[in-house]
Amino acid sequence: MPARTGSVDLGRGLLEAFLTNERINQLLLELLDGAIWNVFPPSSPRRNIATSFAHIHNVRCMRLKMSARGAAQPKRLERSRVTAPQARVALAQSAQAMVGLIERSVAAGGLVAGFKPDVVALVCAAITHEAHHRGQICHWARELGSPLGPEQQLRLWEWDKVWKGAVGR
């Protein structure tokens, strides 16, 4: 991939980073064995893969409720009943709503209502939070006997390739 020339548009970079993060969530959903979706792993009696994806979406909903008042809000997921297809759709919806929040915050000089210090920290916090749960999910898949293979794992880390697909480049 050729190196960028000129200045980086930081607002666009934040949007693209968040969209790449979401594409990695969607990719992980595709790679997981559906047979372990609702199984509680031995190391986690309260959370499983299904509840973790619901949690990611619901935390986005909480942030949107606090920071994007007046904008359309995605519906929260019921953690105990969510299916993988429902999680896929809900995550896509909350990702688009977060993109709107990021765009509005960039246009407001980087300020985010109800979140300090700024939109950069918001995007970093969101990506870090979601990556943490993806790590748990991958660990649980291995613990439940359906680990991701090395090639599958690599697909989750090839940020440049995922970025191209996420932003249509």
Image: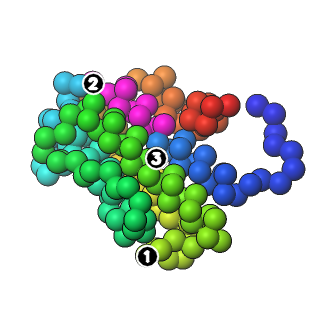
Give me the disc on residue 96: 3
Task: Locate the C terminus by quadrant.
Answer: top right
Give me the disc on residue 114: 1
> Label 3: how many residues lie within 10 Å, few (<14), some (14-19) or many (20+)?
some
Q: Earlier in the sequence, mark 3 or mark 2?
A: 2
Distance CA(mark 3)–CA(mark 2): 26 Å
Q: Where on the picture, by quarter, is residue 9?
A: bottom right
Position of 63 with respect to 55 (left or right) is right
Q: Nearest the camera: 63 or 44? A: 63
Tell me the magenta residue range: 23-33
Q: Is residue 27 magenta?
A: yes
Residue in view at x 35 percent, y 32 percent: 29
Residue in view at x 32 percent, y 28 percent: 32
Q: Nearest the camera: 105 or 132? A: 105
Q: Earlier in the sequence, mark 3 or mark 1?
A: 3
Q: Where on the picture, by quarter, is residue 63?
A: bottom left
Q: Main secondary structure of the magenta part?
A: helix
Distance CA(mark 3)–CA(mark 1): 19 Å
Does any portion of residue 128 appear in the rendered image?
no
Task: Locate the N terminus by quadrant.
Answer: top right
| Disc 3 residue type (three-letter) | Gln
**Numbered disc 1: secondary structure:** loop
**Colour mode?**
rainbow
Give me the disc on residue 33: 2
Can you give x and y, in whole percent of width and height, for residue 66 in the image? 37, 70
